[in-house]
């Protein structure tokens, strides 16, 4: 039974609606930015709303989460971050309870605890935001373990995490990187330009159709992703599935770099549930006129990569097998059945 | 990075040497060479036919010099023509096979024949080759392949193969109701030509789907059959074709969709090529910075500062391993990839 929704103040509702609009308009697209902005929003919510006990706070978070999920049902990053927040709040309240039990003789303990508790929660949120902002650097610390001299590494399109990962390795080692250009967004070109800034990386840009052809010379594939589902499958940018499958055929290892805020506690029951189709203009320009009318032009944004094709998941704690993911999810989010949201039923 | 067959701008016209010094390049050869370089003539069959017909004209204008015979000298006369064509665009295997056959026929011309008779014999042989092994062969293949399409099929194809196009149109004219998914790749965007032909033949908008190659896993779930065209087959069963074909075949294989390849027997080759890197055709690399191959196309992003560490590689060909191909439709029947050396041997024995 869902607890009755808490009435949110007008100020908070304005913040929430502003956030939703910015995301819908595409003003925030980078994964880390979405995560950090969600946490900033929650910091406002927690500090501006009136709550006196842990249950009210949890209800407030659940209500906000439900609104966000209804408005942006396919944005997994928001729900992941909120699940983590719930877990942090519950852990903080457990710590405070144990402390309160020890110091039960003080008179105005109640007011002190509430003030202290609020400060504690805000501290926890601030720490989490700092952790989010440093995710890519923490992941990049593992780079030297995975990339060695003169290796030929293949990456797909553009990912900030992978970019920092490769640049960190390039500080000490010389290697080659092949980047697929990822039409129709052509984001691979931008990634290539950034990587070529390092004097130790030789970058080659190839069209997506040449991936299988070049794969026999590739030593390692390093991918970024939008989200990692509970079974270890990825929701990554379009084209990643074919790259991973070609690597699998050539027995080349696939390493996926993803921060813990991308780990989602739900299983993907449907390959297309979290996919969108973007404008077909880049595939077949509207200039073609009559042809565009007579043909169905399909341009998906994401790809589902099954977990069998992923060899290692690298996050800020290091590398893990996809089969170990359930353990990380349990630590970060607690039991999935305790989560108040369901991405399949917003 | 491994060396590839050099792309345009890097090739050098080899200097004529030995007996071939001083032989001019025939204007017909110049014409088709340039048309091939600008991709006006593209596709294995079109190029092979164009080359054979051009050589027919070259032979027509040829005059045997004194003290030698047509059979001995004509091949030498043809080499600078061939070099010019290779300089414009590396030969595809179908062209190479056709030219090798033609040289074989020239060498076998009897010395007793006068020039006119020898030439008309060669003309009829060239016509016969084009008719039997290219045109009629592709018609037979298209008919045979069209029988494989049933109502409610979802056919996925890649790029634009002339035979696959014929096949789809024949099936349509026989009244089959089916959907076609055309997957296309960058720069050439040949798939758009196929889409246009399909729309002109009456396919409605719910029956044709067009998508880039990155959408493969999204679309392969719906496909029931995959039809592909090949540029050549090697003796070990490896298939040479447009870059991206291997990915389509791999995706089809993983989703258990049958892959049917159409290939005329004249494209079978005795060579063995292990992977797509040992030799490949390179397109102009700088074109990758633009959205299409057409003149005046938009650039994909801000022009990059000249960085020698950033290179563009425009691979045009692909090798598909034989385990991804279910069956090859040829004019001599439906064969598995393991029967290719058998077919090659049969044709060699016929000569």
Image (spheres, coloured by chain):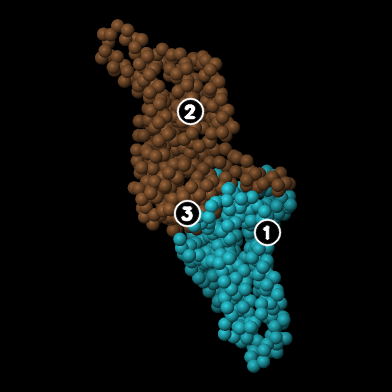
Chain colours: A brown, B cyan
Q: Which mark is residue A203?
A: 3
A326 lies above or below B61: above
> Which residue is most to the bottom?
B67
The reply to the same-chain question for discs 3 and 2 is: yes
Q: Secondary structure at mark 3?
A: strand
Taking the spot 64% from the left edge, 50% from the top edge, the residue there is: B298
Taking the spot 63% from the left edge, 83% from the top edge, the residue there is: B22
B64 lies above or below A238: below
Kindly report the distance in space between the C-alpha atoms of the residues bearing marks 1 and 2.
55 Å
Give how far across and how far down residue A71 sits, in percent: 56, 27
A43 lies above or below A193: above
Decide which of tag 3 and tag 2 comes sooner along the chain: 2
> In the rendered structure, the residue with mark 3 lies on which chain?
A
> Is A102 on the left-hand or right-hand side of A311?
left
Nearest to the observer: residue B85 or residue A172:
A172
Q: Nearer the viewer, mark 3 or mark 2?
A: 3
Image quarter of the C terminus of chain B? bottom right
Q: Which mark is residue B166?
A: 1
């Amino acid at each position: 039974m869902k607890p009755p929704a808490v009435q949110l103040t007008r100020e908070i509702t304005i913040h929430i609606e502003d956030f939703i609009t910015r995301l819908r308009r595409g003003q925030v697209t980078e994964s880390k930015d979405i995560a950090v902005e969600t946490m900033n929003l929650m910091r406002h919510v927690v500090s501006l709303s009136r709550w006196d006990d842990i249950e009210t706070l949890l209800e407030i978070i659940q209500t906000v989460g439900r609104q966000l999920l209804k408005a942006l049902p396919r944005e997994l990053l928001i729900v992941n971050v909120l699940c983590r927040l719930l877990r942090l709040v519950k852990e903080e309240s457990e710590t405070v309870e144990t402390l309160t039990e020890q110091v039960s003789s003080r008179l105005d303990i109640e007011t002190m605890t509430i003030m202290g508790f609020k400060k504690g929660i805000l501290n926890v949120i601030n720490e989490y935001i700092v952790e989010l902002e440093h995710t890519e650097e923490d992941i990049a610390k593992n780079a030297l373990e995975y990339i060695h001299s003169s290796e030929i590494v293949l990456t797909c399109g553009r990912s900030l995490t992978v970019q920092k990962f490769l640049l960190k390795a390039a500080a000490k080692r010389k290697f080659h990187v092949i980047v697929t250009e990822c039409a129709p967004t052509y984001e691979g070109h931008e990634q290539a330009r950034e990587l070529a800034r390092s004097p130790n990386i030789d970058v080659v840009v190839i069209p997506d159709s040449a991936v299988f052809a070049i794969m026999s010379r590739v030593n390692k594939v390093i991918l970024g992703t939008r989200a990692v589902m509970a079974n270890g499958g990825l929701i990554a940018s379009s084209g990643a599935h074919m790259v991973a499958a070609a690597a699998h055929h050539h027995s080349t290892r696939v390493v996926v770099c993803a921060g813990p805020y991308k780990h989602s506690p739900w299983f993907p029951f449907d390959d297309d549930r979290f996919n969108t189709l973007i404008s077909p203009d880049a595939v077949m320009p509207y200039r073609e006129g009559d042809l565009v009318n007579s043909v169905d032009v399909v341009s998906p944004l994401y790809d589902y990569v099954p977990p069998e094709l992923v060899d290692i998941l690298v996050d800020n704690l290091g590398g893990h097998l996809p089969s170990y993911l359930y353990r990380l999810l349990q630590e970060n989010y607690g039991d999935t059945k305790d989560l108040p949201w369901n991405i399949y039923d917003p | 990075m491994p060396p590839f067959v050099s792309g345009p701008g890097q090739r050098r016209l080899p200097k004529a040497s030995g007996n071939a010094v001083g032989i001019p390049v025939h204007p017909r050869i110049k014409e088709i060479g340039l048309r091939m370089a600008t991709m006006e003539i593209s596709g294995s069959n079109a190029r092979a036919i164009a080359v054979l017909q051009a050589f027919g004209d070259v032979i027509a204008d040829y005059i045997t010099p004194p003290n030698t015979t047509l059979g001995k000298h004509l091949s030498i006369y043809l080499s600078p023509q061939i070099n010019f064509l290779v300089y414009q665009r590396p030969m595809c295997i179908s062209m190479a096979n056709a030219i090798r056959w033609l040289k074989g026929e020239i060498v076998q011309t009897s010395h007793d024949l006068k020039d006119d008779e020898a030439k008309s014999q060669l003309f009829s042989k060239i016509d016969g080759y084009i008719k039997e092994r290219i045109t009629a062969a592709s018609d037979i293949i298209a008919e045979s392949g069209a029988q494989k399409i049933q109502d409610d099929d979802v056919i996925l194809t890649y790029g634009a193969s002339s035979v696959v196009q014929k096949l789809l149109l024949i099936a349509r004219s026989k009244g089959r109701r089916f959907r076609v998914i055309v997957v296309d790749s960058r720069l050439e965007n040949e798939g758009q030509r196929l889409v246009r032909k399909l729309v002109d033949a009456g396919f409605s908008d719910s029956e044709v789907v067009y998508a880039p190659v990155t959408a493969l896993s999204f679309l392969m779930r719906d496909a029931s059959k995959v039809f592909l065209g090949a540029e050549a087959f090697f003796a070990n069963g490896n298939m040479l074709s447009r870059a991206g074909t291997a990915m389509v075949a791999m995706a089809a294989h993983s989703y258990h969709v049958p892959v049917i390849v159409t290939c005329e027997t004249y494209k079978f080759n005795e060579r063995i090529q292990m992977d797509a890197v040992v030799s490949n055709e390179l397109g102009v690399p700088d074109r990758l910075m633009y959205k299409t191959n057409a003149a005046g196309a938009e650039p994909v992003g801000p022009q990059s500062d000249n960085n020698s560490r950033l290179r563009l590689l425009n691979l045009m060909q692909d090798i598909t391993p034989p385990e991804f191909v279910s069956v090859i439709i040829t004019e001599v029947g439906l064969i598995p990839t393991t029967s290719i050396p058998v077919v090659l041997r049969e044709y060699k024995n016929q000569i």
